[in-house]
């Protein structure tokens, strides 16, 4: 019974760390978020915090996974195009997380990076889900029939990442409005 209690406490502490890290990174960005600040906020030493994740990169990968988990329940709406615009608009409110995502996605191109598997799986999953949503929109007549859902899903994902890069360089850039204009061209 003690193991279950210790295990449950470990899971709860890990969740607390991730919640705090999401907030710290959203406010201070990838470069401004220190392991020390996150550790202090949850009452741990840096070594104690990293015990739960293994490394700073693994912690930051877990933060991105948590961000996906937090965003997912709100992304189960009927209109996948509008939902994507909503997520991109929300990202403008958390530039530190956009910065973390952009930085780690580049670093994760190295197969040895702790985030490599996360990004490879995430891109494959997003392409598959978005393509399925596009096919459904074509079947029900909400979307034009003349485009390839698989290619379009890959292009839309690439466009959102590119829009985020532009936003990071110029925070006045409206990612959501630009994405909406592109996606409106898919509608019937």
Image: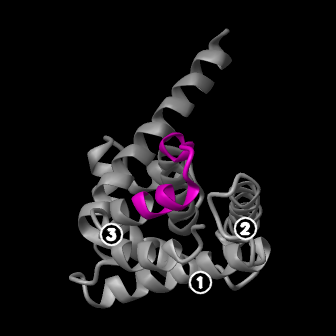
16 up-or-down from 2: above or below: below
Examine the structure image and report whether residue 81 is included in the region drawn in magenta. yes
Q: Residues within 10 Å of mark 3 (few under 14, many from 20)?
A: many
Q: Using residue 149 as the reference point, say whether residue 42 is left or right of it.
A: left
Give the x, y percent position of residue 113.
Answer: 67, 76
**Main secondary structure along the magenta-highlighted residues:** helix
Give the x, y percent position of residue 8.
Answer: 58, 23
Give the residue pinned by disc 3.
96
Give the residue pinned by disc 2.
127
Give the residue pinned by disc 1.
107
Name the residue located 21 percent from the left edge and 82 percent from the top edge.
172
Name the residue located 42 percent from the left edge and 86 percent from the top edge.
165
Disc number lying in front (2 or 3): 2
125 up-or-down from 181: above or below: above
The disc placed on residue 45 is: none
The stretch of residues the image draws in magenta is: 73-86
């Amino acid at each position: 019974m003690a193991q279950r209690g210790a295990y449950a406490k470990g899971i709860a502490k890990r969740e607390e760390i991730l919640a705090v890290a999401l907030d710290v990174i959203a406010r201070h960005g990838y470069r401004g978020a220190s392991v020390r600040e996150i550790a202090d906020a949850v009452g741990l030493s840096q070594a104690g915090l990293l015990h739960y994740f293994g490394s700073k990169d693994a912690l930051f990968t877990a933060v991105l996974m948590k961000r996906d988990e937090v965003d997912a329940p709100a992304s189960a709406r009927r209109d996948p195009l509008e939902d994507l615009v909503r997520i991109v608009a929300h990202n403008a409110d958390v530039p530190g997380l956009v910065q973390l995502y952009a930085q780690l996605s580049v670093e994760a191109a190295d197969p040895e990076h702790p985030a490599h598997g996360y990004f490879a799986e995430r891109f494959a999953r997003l392409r598959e889900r978005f393509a399925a949503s596009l096919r459904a929109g074509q079947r029900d007549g909400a979307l034009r029939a003349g485009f390839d859902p698989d290619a379009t899903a890959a292009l839309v994902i690439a466009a959102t990442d590119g829009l985020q890069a532009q936003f990071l360089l110029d925070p006045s850039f409206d990612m959501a409005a630009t994405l909406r204009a592109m996606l409106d061209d898919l509608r019937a």
